[in-house]
Amino acid sequence: MTTDRPAEHPHRHPHLLTAGAVVAAIVAGLGVASQHRVNGELGQVLGDGFTAALLSFSIGLVIVLVTALALPSGRAGLRRARRQLGTGELPWWMLLGGLGGAFLVLGQGLVAGILGVAVYTVATVTGQTIMGLVLDAIGFAGAARKPVTAPRVIGAALTVVAVVVAVAPELGASIPVLALLLPLIAGLGIGTQQALNGRVRAATGSAAAATTINFVVGTSALAVATGIHLLIVGLPDPLPTNPALYLGGVLGAIFIAIQVVTVARIGVLLLGLCLVAGQLLGALVFDAVIPIGVPTSSYTAVAVALTLLGVVIASQRGRGSRPSIRP
C-alpha cells in the first residue's frame, strides 16, 4: 500500500520564495517600462496626457474589478475591507496607495514622450529608492521593520548614482529640468504605494481585493483631475485606432498585482530596486528598438549595470543584522 506524501510547507524554503519574489518583481519592472512606452505615445497621439492617463487606469480598473468579483477570495477580501473600514481596524488612509500609481501614469502621459522611456524611468529611481529605504526602516503602515544595513544603503546609493549617470549628459539640454520633477515625485509615490498596498493585502487576505482598491482610488483621482483639465483646455484629439496604445492599463493591472503579492516577502526597498532593474532593462530595449523622446546612449547601459549591481548588493543580509521587528 502506498501513502500520499504530505505537502511540503511553503515556509520550509524561504530562500526559494524570496528568489521567486525577486524575479517576479523584476518582471513587473519590465511591465512598468512597457507601460511608460505605451502611455507616453498615447499621450502624444491624443495631445493630452490627462486623458491618456485616465484611459489607461480605467482599462486596468475594469480588468482587476472583473477578476476580483470572479474570485471567491476577491469578493471575500472586498467585504472584509468594507467591514474593517467600518470598525476602524483598517484606517481609510491606507487605501490611498492608488494615488501613487495615478501620479505615475499621469507623468507617463505628460512627459514620458518627451523624456524617453529610459530617462523617465531613471528619474523615478531616486524617489523609489529613498522612499523604500525610509519606509522599511520605520515599519510604515504596520509592516515589519527592516534594519538599515550597509548592503541596503550601498545598493540604494548605487541606484542614485545610476540616475546621475543616465540623466546628467542631457540635463538642461534635451531634458528640461522641470520635466524631471514629475517622475521624481512619482517615484516617491510608488514607494509609498507599494507599502500601503501590501498592508491592504495583508488586512483583506486577498491580492485581488487590494489591487482593485488601488485602481478604484487611482481612477477616481484621475477622473476628477482630467475633468477639471478638460473644462479648462477643451476636448483632446480623437481616440487612436491602434489597439496597442490601450495596453497600458493591462500592464498596470499585472505589475500592481505582482507588487502587492511580493512586498511582504522582500520589503519595500528591495521591491523598488527590483522594479528599477526591470524598468531600466526594458527601457534600454525600448529606446534602442522603438525609441521615443530623448534617444538612449551608452550612459543608459552603464546606469542599468549599476542598478543591477545595487539590487544584488541590497539583497544581501548585512553582517550582524537582526530579524525584522514588527511594531
Image (tube, helix red, strand yellow):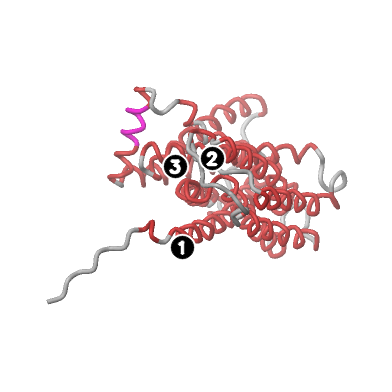
Question: Which quadrant of the figure has residue 233?
Answer: top right
Q: Is residue 178 magenta?
A: no
Residue 294 picture location, percent across and down: 78, 53
Is residue 51 something that shows in the picture?
Answer: no
Q: Amino acid at mark 1?
A: Leu
The answer to whether 200 is drawn above or below residue 29 in the figure is above
Sequence-first tag of 1 and 2 = 1
Q: Which residue is mark 3?
A: 211
Disc 1 to disc 2, C-alpha distance: 22 Å
Residue 210 sits above or below residue 276 on the image? above
Does 81 sit left or right of 130 as displayed?
A: left
Labels in figure, total: 3
Q: Nearer the viewer, mark 3 or mark 2?
A: 2
First in sequence: mark 3 vs mark 1: 1
Say what amino acid the circle numbered 3 marks: Thr
Task: Write down the region rendered in magenta.
Answer: 78-84
Quadrant in the picture for the N terminus: bottom left
| Residue positioned 70% across, 40% down in the render | 184
Q: Would you name the residue on which mark 1 appears?
A: 16
Looking at the rendered structure, the kind of residue marked 2 is Arg
Q: Residue 22, image x and y in percent? A: 53, 57
Label 3 or label 2, whichever comes before in sequence order: 2
Along the line of sight, the residue nearer the viewer: 239 or 41:
41
Q: Residue at x 59, y 57 (%)?
A: 30
Q: Which residue is denoted by mark 2 in the rendering?
A: 145
Mark 2 lies on a secondary structure that is: loop
Where is residue 259 shown, x and y percent of the image?
50, 48
